[in-house]
């Protein structure tokens, strides 16, 4: 038991003033012997052997030198069963053990508090994820239900209409978008907590035009039919599904759909008509709406920049 570590044997306090006062009447050899005995006791739970030959070894003295110094050096030591003990050393060991236990208890308390905070954070994160999943499922169900209704209405209208492809050049939409398929909307990508940056997503391969998107296109471009919008949606889907590279993703596919519709020429218009409309819009922006003649509300630009491609 004496050789078993008990946690405070690595260092030993030494109060200089007390040691000088205690060893004032001792020789240099006796002071050294006293310090060596206390270090031995510190390593062995405050006990030193009572065998004179062992004490001579501990103090680095010969048996004769130890016999002469023993009465002075052992004056503050008391014989206690296993060996000699010193009250000064016992008190110092008791203080060291108490400090170690307090630090250990504080460390365990801090670790427990940290573990509790981690559990609470995980529970809060789990609750947030569950709420997000529920909200996403509800939104997707609503959008799918509405889109399915819109597709059903469009199929009913197309059954009684002519089967001729729209003049915009999109071809027979019925070959691209199956009437038996359910129009869906891609579920929004789940955002991780504390994400540092937003990342775009690709258009799902099974994407179908949502009802809300189609209704917006009909309102934005008066004169378009449901079949025409469905044909544009087929082209929109095929274009973005086959596209590769960084431009093939988007943070907001609905916004990209709106821009696609705004750039789309009127139904039946040719590319030449689209270019002419672009030039006319540019001319109106430069000179105002006055048949190409400068007006007071024309934009003031330099001659070098007045060329229109």
Image: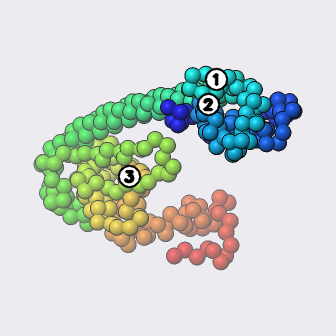
Which class describes the residues within 10 Å of circle 3: few (<14), some (14-19), or many (20+)? some
Q: Are marks 1 and 3 in contact (CB under 8 Å)?
A: no
Foreground: disc 2 or disc 3: 2
The answer to whether one can see residue 186 in this image is: yes
Q: Position of residue 30 (x, y in %)?
A: 78, 38
Task: Please determine whether, in this image, residue 147 is positioned above or below residue 274.
Answer: above
Q: Earlier in the sequence, mark 2 or mark 1?
A: 2
Instruction: Give the CA distance from mark 1 to mark 3.
Output: 90 Å
Q: Earlier in the sequence, mark 1 or mark 3?
A: 1
Camera-nearest residue between 177 and 77? 77
The answer to whether one can see residue 235 in this image is: no
* Residue drawn 83% across the image and 33% down it: 23
- What residue does disc 3 label? 253
Camera-nearest residue between 87 and 112? 87
Q: Are marks 2 and 1 in contact (CB under 8 Å)?
A: yes
Q: Position of residue 78 (x, y in %)?
A: 67, 23
* Residue drawn 65% across the image and 58% down it: 297
Which class describes the residues within 10 Å of circle 1: few (<14), some (14-19), or many (20+)? some
- Secondary structure, mark 3, is helix
Mark carried by residue 79: 1
Which class describes the residues within 10 Å of circle 2: few (<14), some (14-19), or many (20+)? some
Task: Please determine whether, in this image, residue 135 is positioned above or below residue 210.
Answer: above
Foreground: disc 1 or disc 3: 1
Camera-nearest residue between 73 and 274? 73
- What residue does disc 2 label? 50
Q: Are marks 2 and 3 in contact (CB under 8 Å)?
A: no
């Amino acid at each position: 038991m004496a050789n078993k570590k008990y946690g405070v044997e690595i260092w030993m306090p030494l109060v200089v003033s007390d040691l000088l006062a205690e060893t004032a009447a001792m020789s240099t050899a006796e002071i050294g012997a006293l310090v060596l005995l206390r270090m031995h006791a510190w390593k062995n739970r405050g006990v030193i052997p009572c065998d004179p030959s062992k004490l001579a070894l501990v103090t680095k003295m010969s048996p004769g030198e130890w016999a002469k110094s023993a009465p002075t050096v052992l004056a503050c030591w008391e014989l206690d069963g296993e060996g000699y003990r010193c009250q000064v050393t016992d008190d110092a060991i008791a203080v060291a053990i108490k400090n170690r236990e307090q630090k250990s208890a504080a460390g365990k308390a801090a670790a427990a508090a940290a573990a509790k905070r981690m559990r609470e954070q995980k529970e809060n994160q789990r609750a947030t994820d569950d709420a997000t999943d529920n909200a996403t499922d509800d939104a997707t169900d609503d959008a799918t239900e509405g889109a399915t209704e819109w597709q059903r209405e469009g199929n009913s209208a197309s059954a009684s209409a002519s089967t001729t492809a729209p003049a915009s050049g999109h071809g027979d939409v019925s070959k691209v978008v199956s009437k038996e398929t359910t129009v869906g909307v891609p579920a929004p990508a789940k955002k991780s907590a504390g994400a540092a940056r937003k990342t775009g997503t690709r258009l799902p391969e099974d994407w179908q035009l949502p009802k809300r998107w189609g209704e917006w296109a009909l309102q934005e471009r008066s004169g378009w039919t449901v079949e025409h919008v469905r044909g544009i949606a087929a082209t929109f889907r095929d274009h973005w599904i086959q596209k590769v590279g960084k431009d093939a993703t988007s943070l907001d596919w609905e916004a990209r759909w709106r821009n696609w519709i705004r750039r789309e020429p009127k139904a039946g218009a040719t590319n030449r008509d689209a270019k002419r409309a672009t030039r006319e819009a540019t001319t109106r922006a430069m000179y105002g709406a006055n048949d190409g003649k400068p007006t007071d509300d024309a934009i003031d630009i330099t001659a070098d920049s007045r060329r229109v491609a």
